[in-house]
Every structure is written in C-alpha cells, then in structure tokens.
Amino acid sequence: MKKQHATTVDNVMKQAKADLLPERTEREEAERAAAMKKFTEKLEALQAEKELLAEDREREKIEYKLHISKMAEEHAKAMQAQRKELQQKAKEKGDDDRDSLANLSIGSASISTPQSSTTGSPRRQASPTNKTEKLMRAVKLLKHHVLKQKKAAQAAEKQYKLKEQIWQEKLVQLKEKVSPEGDRGVMEEKLAKMQRKVVELVQERAEMEEQLEEAKYDGLKARKAKLVKAVQEKEEENQRLKKQVDEEKSRYSKFETDFAQMRFKLAESQSEKEELQEQLDGYADIEDTMKAQLTDMKRQMEQKDGHLGRQKSEVLKLKVSLKKLMKRYAELEKQLHAANKKVAAAEAAEDDDESAAADAAKTGAAGDKDDDLRARYAALEEKTKEYKDALTNKDQEIQTLRAAADPSAATTLEKYKRAVQMLKLNGLKQQREFKKRENDFKKRENELNEKLIDLEGLVKHKLALESELADDRGKLQIARAEIDDLTNEKEDLLDEIAELKERLATYEEEA
C-alpha cells in the first residue's frame, strides 16, 4: 500500500511540474489542452462511478434493515405459534403426569421434609426470557457497532476526498495565477509544500484504514465468541429439557393404551347397534308388504260389492294385525333409541378421555387432585379422631388418678397436652409442605415449557444470524474488490497523464 501511495504522489508531482513549465508553441498548447480534457473527463467518470457506488451502498443498507425487520416479525409469529402448540400439547399430556407427581410428593412428604422447609424459600431461577433478551441486545449492539465503523470509514473517505478536491482546486488556481515566465524557484517551493501535504494525507488515510480494519475484526471476534458461548449454554439446557420431554412421552403412551381400549368397547357397541338396525329393516319390509296387501283388499272390495261383510271382517283382522305390527315396531324403535343412548354414552366417554388432557385444569385433573387431597385430609381426620380418643382416655385416667389422690396426675396431664399440641403442629406442617410441593411443581412445569419455546427460537435465530453474517462478508469482499479496481484504474490514468507530461517536456526541450 505504501509503495502504491508513493507512486501516486510522484505521478502527481510530475503532473504539476509539467503543468507549470513555460508554454512556447500553439501546437504544444493544443496537445496539452486535449490531454487535460481527457484527464478531466476520466476524473468526472470516476467521480460518477463513486457516487453510484455510494448510492448502491445506501440502498443495500436500507434493504438490509428491511430484511432484519421482516425476520424479526416472522420470528415473533413463529414463536407465538410454537407457544400455542406447546401449551395445547402440555394441556393434553400433562394430566397423568401431574397426578403421578402429586402422589409421589404425598409419599415423600410423609417420609421426610422438603428442602424448602429447612433452607427457606427456594432460589429463583433465571428466566429464559431474560437470557433471550440479553442475546438480542448483544446482537443489536454488534450490528450498531458495525454500522458505526462503516460510518466512520465513510466519513474518513469523505474527508480525504474533500482534501483532495481542495488540493486540486489550489493547483488549478496556481496554474491560472502563475505565468509561463514567472519565478520557477517560488513555484518549486510551493510544489514541495504541496508534495509534503499530499504525503501526509496519504499516510493519514493509510493509518485510518488500518485502525478501522483492526477495530472491526477485533470487535467482531469478541462478540462472536460471546455469542458462541451463549448458544452452547442454550444447547445444553435444550438437551436437558429434551430428556424431560422423553419422560413425558413415555407417560403419555400409557394414556394412549387406555384410549385404545375405550375405542374397542365403542366398536363393540356399534356392532350391536348395526344388528338392531338390521332387525328394524326387516320389520319395515314386513310393514311394506302388509300395506301392499291392504291396497289389494281395497281393490277387491270395490270390485266385489256383494261380499262387503266378509271383506269388512278381513279388513278388521288386517287392521288388528297391523296394530300389533305397529306396536312391535314402536318397541323396536325404543330398543334402537336405547342402543343409540348407549353408543352416545360410549362416544361421550371416548370424548372425555380425549379431552382429559385439555380440560384437566377445569374438571378431570381437578377431580383427581381433589380425590388425592380428600384422601389426605381423610387420613388427617382419622389421626385427629385417634388423638381425640386418646385425649378422652387420658382424661378418664386423670379422673381416676385424682380419685386415687395421685400426686403425679398434674404432670402427666401436662405431658399429654403437649404431645397433642405437637401432633397438631406436625399435621399442619405436612399440609403446608404438600401445598408448597404442588405449587413448585406447577412453576417448574411452566418454566420448562417456556424454556423449550425460547430455545427453539434461539436456534433458529442463530442460524439466521450466521447466514446474515456470511452474506455481509461476501458483500464486504465484493466492495473491497471494486474499490481496489477503482484505485488501480485511477493509478493507471495518473501514469498515462505523467507519461504525456514527460513527452511534452521532452518536446519542449528539443524545441
């Protein structure tokens, strides 16, 4: 880079010296004017290309921001949908698990006291939403830092361009002011000063570019390491949660076996219903034949007016038989209605089994929990009855001791009262511990569900960030390649101009 900047400085100085040489002939003036026109046209083309590149960069920034906002909206929608699905699955699957865990907590409460009774309130765990917010903040800070660095680089480039334009304007002014017969020593001093300024500007630009590149890569590496650590921690938590989900699936398989049994019973009831329906169809055919016979008899009655009495008696018999058949049909309809009720009851039982997971918090699970609690309270009531019976027995013993004038009766009575109070306190402690365990289990279950949802979202967000980083790196490489191409073209143009100036100088010397 330094060699390239030195060559550009030399070329610029050669150009300035050639411009400041005295002009002698009209032909040389015309050639010089043509070369300057070409040079200005090329400079204008380069400036136009730079402006187009700046516009393209701004457009890419706007598109990048829109893409990030769209990704954030899609991520939020996906997170909401996943949460809804997981909540429904948890409602459908979690009833049997809660009942089993409640039974386990009751058994453990009767054996030993929990950690919460000895160590106080349980330590609150860090919610997964806070961790996700921290990660999102870190990503936002990284993007903001990258944008700042880009803006700083653009500002440095603008400053350099402004200085270069000022320098070029000064050169033009010097060309206009100085005549070909002026003092060459003064012009050489001015050129030396300008050369020093150009060298300083080039060095400042090189230092600024190096500092910006170092700051970019150092910041990106540090933030990438932090993000990788956070993602690894989340993956470990995700594995733990997956183990718990597998356990819940094994429990849910038991529920599915019970549901299959209920379906088998429903299929049997449907087969009975089909048999009754076949019988009813047979009776309907009989009814149709009897109606056809009645129509035939009516026709015969119309044809045979002389045999009205006999035909009336036959008609009455047929009516009686038809009434019997109608009664039989009504009885069969009642039987079919009863069979339909049985099938509806079986279907309702099946629906109850299917919606046991969804309505656990309202009916099913509440009933099971109430049964467990009632059993627990019944046991406590039995204990209290035993304690009361023991108290009555002890009161009788005290009365007998008083009757016998026993001096130690008062002390024994106090001991028994203390023992009863201790037993009551133990019962209250067990009730409190049981309630605390239920609440802790519910909280833990909700936290696990939230962690699952957040971890899945974080994994997707990580993949999206990695793809975005890869795209940004590719864009940066393309932009750098374009900048290098433009600088090379500019140096080639300067070299061509310097060669033309040297030729002009040789022509003047020869002349």
Image (cartoon, grey):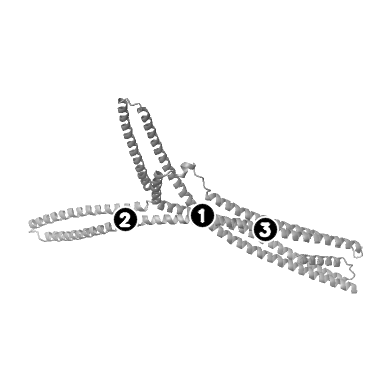
Element class at badge 2: helix
* Disc 1 from disc 2: Cα separation: 38 Å
Residue 15 or residue 2, whichever sits in front? 2
Q: Is residue 32 visible?
A: yes
Task: Name the amino acid, label 2.
Answer: Met
Task: Name the amino acid, label 3.
Answer: Lys
Q: Position of residue 504 (x, y in %)?
A: 85, 71
Q: Label 2: few (<14), some or many (≥20) within 10 Å? A: some
Q: Which residue is mark 2?
A: 262
Left or right relative to 247: residue 311: left
Instruction: Return the disc, 3 or 2, that comes first in the chain's sequence.
Output: 3
* Disc 3 from disc 2: Cα separation: 66 Å
- Quarter of image, res 275: bottom left
Relative to 15, does residue 346 appear above or below in the rendering? above
> On the rendered image, what quadrant is the C terminus found in?
bottom right
Relative to 73, does residue 33 appear above or below in the rendering? below
Q: Position of residue 93 (x, y in %)?
A: 41, 53
Q: Position of residue 183 (x, y in %)?
A: 92, 63
Q: Which residue is mark 1?
A: 237
- Residue at 58% of width from left, 56% of height from top? 229
Q: Is residue 74 visible?
A: no
Q: Position of residue 435 (x, y in %)?
A: 42, 42
Residue 480 or residue 307, whichever sits in front? 480
Disc on res. 216: 3
Element class at badge 1: helix
Left or right relative to 156: residue 411: left
Instruction: Return the disc, 1 or 3, that comes first in the chain's sequence.
Output: 3
Element class at badge 3: helix
Question: Pointers 1 and 3 in contact (CB under 8 A)?
Answer: no
Left or right relative to 357: residue 65: right
